[in-house]
Image (cartoon, rainbow, N blue to C red):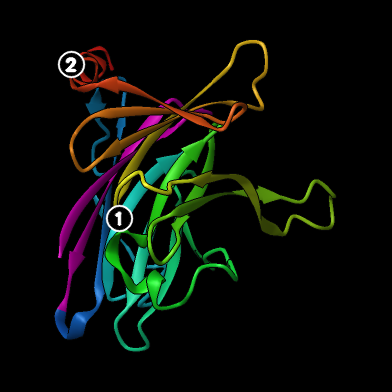
């Protein structure tokens, strides 16, 4: 398994590239390099040693607010989870996936049943129901008390996908200017057409394939 991920650290105006590579006995290794002022920092390419064998199979990844998150699967016990790397201090931690009673464990073993997403500049997870008729979007929050910084999942949106098809990729969220608690979720179904979901009205709008290409060029 080979993969590269890029993350940005706002406080130091640095980028870091993380190389995830497979080792013997299904173990995983990490290498990292720092970029600053449009160039690589000399001697910054190194192997990260401060981790255990966190997982055996990477499913997907996402960079949000100075951290890289990996949705992973431990092939030994077939359990899904999330591995997070804080790019500033280069420390790893494991995060449990949201527990949603309406989504069966069987459905969560399907590759597309969980996605990593960014909503309102916060890391989140989208969980699809077993028949893909509904998707719940959770965001990871943190306690604001000095002695309690424990992270917890909050269900931000629940979207009815009945008669909408089998699978969607959630690629973004655009908040409304007048109400930033709501906005439009950007869905891309398997047919390649762009759909916008209004979280306030609870309705979809078909933007079309042509506008999807234009959206990609403008990003």
Horizontal and vertical percent position of residue 94: 50, 67
Residue at image location 18% in from the left, 38% down from the top: 191
Residue matched to label 2: 210
Residue at image location 67% in from the left, 57% down from the top: 151
Can I make out residue 199 in this image? Answer: yes
The one nearer the camera, 115 or 56, is: 115
Q: Which picture quadrant has residue 120?
A: top right
* Whole-number angstrom distance, CA of label 2 to CA of label 1: 27 Å
| 167 up-or-down from 65: above or below | below
Magenta residues span 1-23
Horizontal and vertical percent position of residue 86: 48, 50
From the viewer's perspective, tell me whether residue 180 is left or right of residue 71. Answer: right
Secondary structure mostly seen in magenta is: strand
Residue at image location 18% in from the left, 86% down from the top: 25
The one nearer the camera, 210 or 87, is: 210
Q: Which picture quadrant has residue 33?
A: top left
Q: Check if mark 2's residue and mark 1's residue have beta carbons within 8 Å.
A: no
Within 10 angstroms of label 2, few (less than 14), some, or many (20 or more) residues? few
Within 10 angstroms of label 1, few (less than 14), some, or many (20 or more) residues? some
Q: Is residue 4 magenta?
A: yes
| 83 up-or-down from 217: above or below | below
Q: Secondary structure at mark 2?
A: helix
Q: Is residue 10 magenta?
A: yes
> Which quadrant holds the N terminus?
bottom left
Can I make out residue 66 in this image? Answer: no
Residue matched to label 1: 60
Q: Which picture quadrant has residue 218?
A: top left
Q: Earlier in the sequence, mark 2 or mark 1?
A: 1
| 24 up-or-down from 110: above or below | below
Q: Secondary structure at mark 1?
A: strand
Viewer-side label of 2, 1: 2
């Amino acid at each position: 398994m080979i993969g590269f991920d890029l993350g940005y650290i706002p406080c130091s105006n640095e980028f870091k590239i993380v190389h995830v590579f497979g080792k013997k006995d299904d173990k995983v290794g990490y290498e990292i390099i720092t970029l600053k002022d449009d160039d690589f920092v000399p001697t910054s390419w190194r192997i990260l040693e401060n981790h255990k064998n966190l997982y055996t199979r990477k499913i997907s990844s996402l960079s949000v607010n100075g951290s890289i998150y990996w949705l992973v699967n431990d092939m030994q016990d077939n359990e899904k989870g999330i591995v997070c790397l804080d790019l500033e201090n280069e420390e790893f931690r494991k995060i449990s996936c949201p527990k949603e009673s309406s989504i069966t464990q069987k459905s969560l073993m399907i590759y597309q049943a969980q996605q990593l997403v960014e909503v309102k500049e916060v890391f989140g997870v989208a969980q699809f129901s077993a028949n893909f008729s509904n998707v719940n979007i959770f965001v990871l929050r943190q306690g604001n008390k000095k002695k309690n910084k424990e992270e917890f999942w909050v269900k931000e949106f629940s979207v009815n996908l009945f008669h909408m098809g089998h699978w969607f990729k959630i690629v973004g969220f655009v908040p409304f200017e007048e109400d930033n608690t709501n906005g439009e979720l950007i869905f891309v179904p398997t047919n390649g057409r762009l759909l916008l979901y209004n979280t306030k009205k609870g309705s979809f709008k078909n933007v079309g394939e042509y506008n999807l290409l234009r959206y990609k060029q403008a990003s």
